[in-house]
């Protein structure tokens, strides 16, 4: 089993507005179109953390005309983050690499969602995930948002840092290869996959400072003053 990282809740809170702004509205519309007519939706949020996807998507589905009752299940290995789940949301603490536990959590899902997740998963866990999603009958609709896709750019420019950061990410999980890897696994199993670029475009802000500290730090480079950054992400919808 891989060593699981614990994410800082302050970092997740800091990035949440930028994440919500970046998410693909087009893929959300396609997701909502698949929910038409449902009276109740069982929605499983994988790697839910403290619930960023829920805070964005639950009202967004209503805005898009989905009036079904929403029954959310947050799945994460991190008990401290799950303890922050809003009232009325069910939680399941498990490692996504645990196939049996994952199968139980996914049972009966209409929608399976996740954000900022795929890039931290190793290839084996991502493969188990797609296999278990593919075994569901009927298959759910799946939206994985905000997967890091690498090649971030900063102003003033910093030569070689993106390559060093991306290499570090690849040593921890799928990193910037994640969306392509998972899209291929879905396509092999007959899913229709749509992808859309969802970059952060950051100007001077606490988020930019925190992100730059992590980006330069992981590359082993002293952190300079950065005035802006484009941080590529990608959303993936599988039907
Ligand atoms: C970058 S955080 C994103 C959290 C949340 N989706 C958000 O957008 O704020 C990644 C989340 O995935 C969870 N996670 C990573 N690997 C996992 C695994 N193998 N099993 C269960 N949860 C995992 C982490 O605990 C963390 O909450």
Image (cartoon, grey):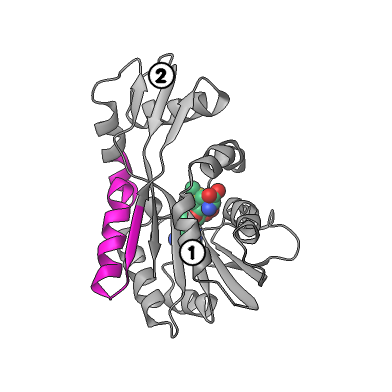
In this rendering, which labeled residue sits more in front, label 1 or label 2?
Answer: 1
Is 184 contained in the magenta span? Answer: yes
Horizontal side, residue 199 vs residue 86: left or right: left
Dot 1 crowding, Cα within 10 Å, few <14, some 14–19, many 20+: many
Q: Quick one: label 1 or label 2, which is nearer the N terminus? A: 1
Label number found at residue 31: 1
Q: Which residues are magenta?
A: 168-195
Quadrant, the N terminus: bottom left
Is residue 175 visible to the viewer in this orientation of the structure?
Answer: yes
Using the numbered discs, state the Cα–Cα distance from disc 1 to disc 2 in whole angstroms. Answer: 40 Å
Relative image position of residue 135 (x, y in whole percent): 38, 82
Residue visible at 53% across and 76% down? 109
Q: Secondary structure at mark 2?
A: loop
Is residue 217 visible to the viewer in this orientation of the structure?
Answer: no
Q: Secondary structure at mark 1?
A: helix
Residue visible at 29% across and 61% down? 183
Residue furthest out toward the right:
87
Q: Where is mark 2, residue-wise?
A: 223
Relative image position of residue 174 (x, y in whole percent): 31, 52
Kindly indicate the quadrant of the structure image that contains residue 226: top left
Dot 1 beta carbon under 8 Å from ligand 1 = no
Q: Is residue 225 above or below residue 87?
A: above
Residue visible at 57% across and 25% down? 206
Overall secondary structure of the magenta stretch? helix
Relative image position of residue 4 (x, y in whole percent): 45, 55
Kindly indicate the quadrant of the structure image that contains residue 121: bottom left
Q: How many marks?
A: 2
Kindly indicate the quadrant of the structure image that contains residue 68: bottom right
């Amino acid at each position: 089993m891989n060593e699981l990282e614990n994410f800082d809740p302050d970092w997740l809170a800091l990035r949440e507005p930028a994440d919500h702004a970046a998410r693909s509205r087009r893929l959300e519309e396609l997701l909502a179109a698949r929910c038409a007519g449902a009276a109740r939706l069982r929605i499983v949020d994988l790697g839910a953390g403290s619930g960023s996807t829920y805070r964005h998507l639950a009202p967004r589905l209503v805005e898009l005309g989905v009036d079904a009752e929403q029954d959310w299940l947050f799945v994460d290995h991190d008990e401290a983050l799950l303890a922050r789940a809003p009232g009325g949301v069910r939680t399941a603490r498990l490692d996504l690499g645990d196939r049996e536990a994952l199968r139980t959590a996914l049972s009966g899902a209409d929608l399976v969602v996740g954000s900022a997740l795929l890039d931290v998963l190793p290839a084996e866990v991502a493969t188990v995930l797609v296999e278990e999603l593919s075994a569901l009958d009927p298959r759910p609709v799946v939206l994985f948002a905000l997967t890091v896709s690498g090649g971030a750019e900063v102003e003033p420019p910093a030569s070689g840092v993106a390559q060093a950061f991306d290499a570090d990410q690849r040593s921890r999980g799928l990193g910037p290869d994640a969306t392509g890897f998972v899209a291929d696994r879905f396509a092999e199993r007959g899913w229709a996959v749509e992808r859309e670029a969802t970059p952060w475009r950051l100007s001077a802000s606490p988020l930019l400072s925190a992100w730059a500290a992590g980006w330069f730090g992981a590359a082993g480079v002293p952190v300079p003053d950065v005035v802006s950054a484009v941080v590529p992400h990608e959303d993936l919808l599988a039907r």
